[in-house]
Every structure is written in C-alpha cells, then in structure tokens.
Image (cartoon, rainbow, N blue to C red):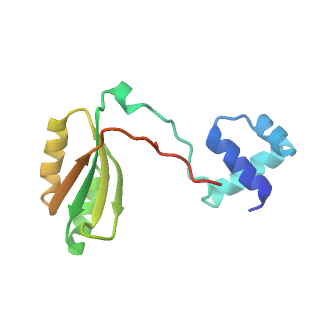
Amino acid sequence: MDEIDLKLLRLLQKNSRTPVKALAGAVNLSSPAVSARIDRLEKQGVIRGYTLDVDPLQLGHHILAYIHLDMQPVQKEEFYPFIAACPNVLECSCVTGQYSMLIKVIYPSTQELDTFIGGLQHFGKTETQIVFSTPVPPRPVQI
C-alpha cells in the first residue's frame, strides 16, 4: 500500500460516494487507474464495505446501552448465533476483564431493552450502562 492508496482511503472515509473522476483528480491518476486501486483494496479486505450513517433517534431508537456479560467459554457456541440474530445489537466483542462480552445495543424503549437483557441472562450475569450522551461519536480509523 503506497501513499496514493492511503490518500484514496482518506478521501473515501470522508465521503464514500465521491465519484471516481473526482478521486482521480485528487490523486493525479486516471479514472481507470483509481478504479483498479479501489478494486484491489476491496479484494485485499482493506475496504470492507460502504455504509450509510443513519441517525437512530430519527428512527425512534432512543436508548443506547452497553451490556457487559459474564459467561462461560463453553457457551460461545450457543451464544454467537443467538447474538448475531439480534437486530438491535450493533456490536458484540469478546473482551478481557471481569466480563467476557461487551455488547452495544440500541432500543426504542427501556422496556424492550429489559426484555433483551432478560434473554441474555440465560448466558450469565449482566451489567448494563445506558448512554446519556456521546461527546466523541464513532469515527473512522485514522489513516
């Protein structure tokens, strides 16, 4: 990966809908050369996809929470398909420390969050933190 690839990645992080012609002008290459670089970065897995940033509040999801789950490693085989099938789970990470999983969820109400937590407790002890504000929102990896 060279400096041109890095510059393309920075430009695409700012706006993944930037036309190839504009990207080509920014890096002083032809449009076909830029397209080939982007295709290569996608095939290598550097670019994993293109997403849409939607405001959850506009969709009625007012509760953002982090749930810590303490479960036994032998439960992972049953847990992973369960958690992957939950549409309100934004992220789930296996972590070190007192708890084994950190789960980021979003729900329209505390009642729905409570129902989800009840199902999670099948796997072990939980501790939940509800987010009041996010002074540093999710941001891309610095390139």
Residue 3 in the figure: left or right of residue 63: right
Q: Nearer the viewer, residue 130 or 100?
A: 130
Residue 73, given in percent of the width and then of the height, sits at 24, 73
Residue 10, given in percent of the width and then of the height, sits at 68, 47
Residue 29 in the figure: left or right of residue 71: right
72 relative to 35, above or below: below
Q: Quadrant of the C terminus?
A: bottom right
Please name the residue shown 87% across and 44% down the image: 28
Residue 30 in the figure: left or right of residue 101: right
Residue 3, given in percent of the width and then of the height, sits at 78, 57
Query: Is residue 63 visible to the viewer in this orientation of the structure?
Result: yes
Please name the residue shown 25% across and 53% down the image: 67
Q: Furthest residue to the front?
A: 135
Query: Is residue 82 visible to the viewer in this orientation of the structure?
Result: no
Q: Nearer the viewer, residue 17 or 78?
A: 17
Q: Furthest residue to the top?
A: 58
92 relative to 32, above or below: below
When asked about the image quadrant of residue 112, the answer is top left
Total marks drawn? 0
When asked about the image quadrant of residue 57, the answer is top left
Q: Nearer the viewer, residue 69 or 88?
A: 69
Residue 95, given in percent of the width and then of the height, sits at 34, 67
27 relative to 93, above or below: above
Q: Quadrant of the N terminus?
A: bottom right
Please name the residue shown 52% across and 46% down the image: 139
